[in-house]
Image: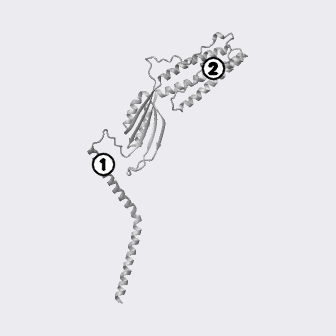
Amino acid sequence: MKKLILALIIAAILITSVLFSTSCAQNSNSSKSEDYNPPRDTTSPPNGYDYDKNYEEEKPQYDDGKADASIPEEASRKVIKYVTVTLETLEYDKVLESLKSRCTASGGYIESANETGVAINKNDKRGGERFATLVFRIPADVMGDFEDYVKSLGNVLSSKTDTKDVTDSYFDIEARLASLEIQKERYLELLDRAEDMNSIVVLTDALTDVLYQIESYTRTLKKYDSLIAYSTITINLYEVIEYTDQPLRNPSFGERISDAFSKSIEAFIDLCADIAVGITAAIPFLVIPALAAIIIIIIFCSRKKKAAAQAKEQ
């Protein structure tokens, strides 16, 4: 009977662990944060466990949860890379489609894509403009080529690269997992030897805590693996009528005067065009009042002539 109860308890623990692992995996897929939040360590034996029984010599060797996490010199660094590129384009639709196609062709995927605005009216420089923010996950080994391709599609306003080295944390978690696996096996052995219900309950609680830590650390490692294998690039794409000038050096006094004069001429031409457009738009509203004024003037002049003729006859 005791063995049956023990088997049922162990089976329940393992089933709960599997369900918890599945739930955690789903949550980690929707998370974008790579922050490392380790679970609580079980660094001391479970309280209330009677070690005076015949299995006393089988006590598990508890450690501090900080197994040797030294990193071999030949081990590769665990680096997470983030890139942000902001660029302008004259061909918004074409560039947007090219970016998405190249992402897929590179073996990556679209993490998110947001678009706002309406298409620019090419005849009206002050028309609406479209803007897109694209977040792609690209395999780390082709990230450099993909970044160069993105920059070739338009006028680059800014580019930023950030890296985060998680090597120490990664190997530390691996060492902790190895230690926890040993603890799990020893707890299972002790559960198999336990003879009273109190010891079974205490060991079951301790084993559950160890399984939780194993699942939590495993989830963190999987998240690191994903972020390391697939770099993240954020692309801010603007639709414009003309590219923004970006001088490579400070302009001279003469260049500044020339640039100011050119801009004033452009502004004057735009003003004249606006006035002409305004007058043209107002013509329909001026025709009726003008016709009414002409009719009134004609009637007034006609009456005035008649009055003068009558006065002359008298």
Q: Quadrant of the N terminus?
A: top right
Image-based side of 81 in relation to 8, left or right:
left
| Distance of label 1 from label 2 (alpha carbons) | 76 Å
The residue under label 2 is 207
Please, what is the three-letter code of the amino acid marked with disc 1? Ala
**Which-is-in-front pick, marks 1 and 2?**
1
> Vertically, is 135 above or below 229?
below
In percent of width and height, residue 4 lies at 71, 18
In percent of width and height, residue 147 lies at 40, 33
Q: Residues within 10 Å of mark 2 (few under 14, many from 20)?
A: many
Residue drawn at the location 51% of the way across and 20% of the way down: 172
What number of labels is visible? Answer: 2
Q: Residues within 10 Å of mark 1 (few under 14, many from 20)?
A: few
Image-based side of 130 in relation to 249, left or right:
right
Residue drawn at the location 41% of the way across and 29% of the way down: 142
Q: Quadrant of residue 94?
A: top left
Q: Which mark is residue 236?
A: none
Q: Quadrant of residue 152?
A: top left
Residue that extends furthest to the bottom in the rendered view of this protein: 314
Q: Earlier in the sequence, mark 1 or mark 2?
A: 2
In percent of width and height, residue 119 lies at 43, 47
- The structure's colour scheme is one colour
Please, what is the three-letter code of the amino acid marked with disc 2? Leu
**Which structural element holds mark 1?**
helix
> Vertically, is 209 above or below 56?
below
> Vertically, is 173 above or below 136?
above
Residue that extends furthest to the left in the rendered view of this protein: 254
The residue under label 1 is 260
Q: Quadrant of the C terminus?
A: bottom left
In percent of width and height, residue 133 lies at 45, 39
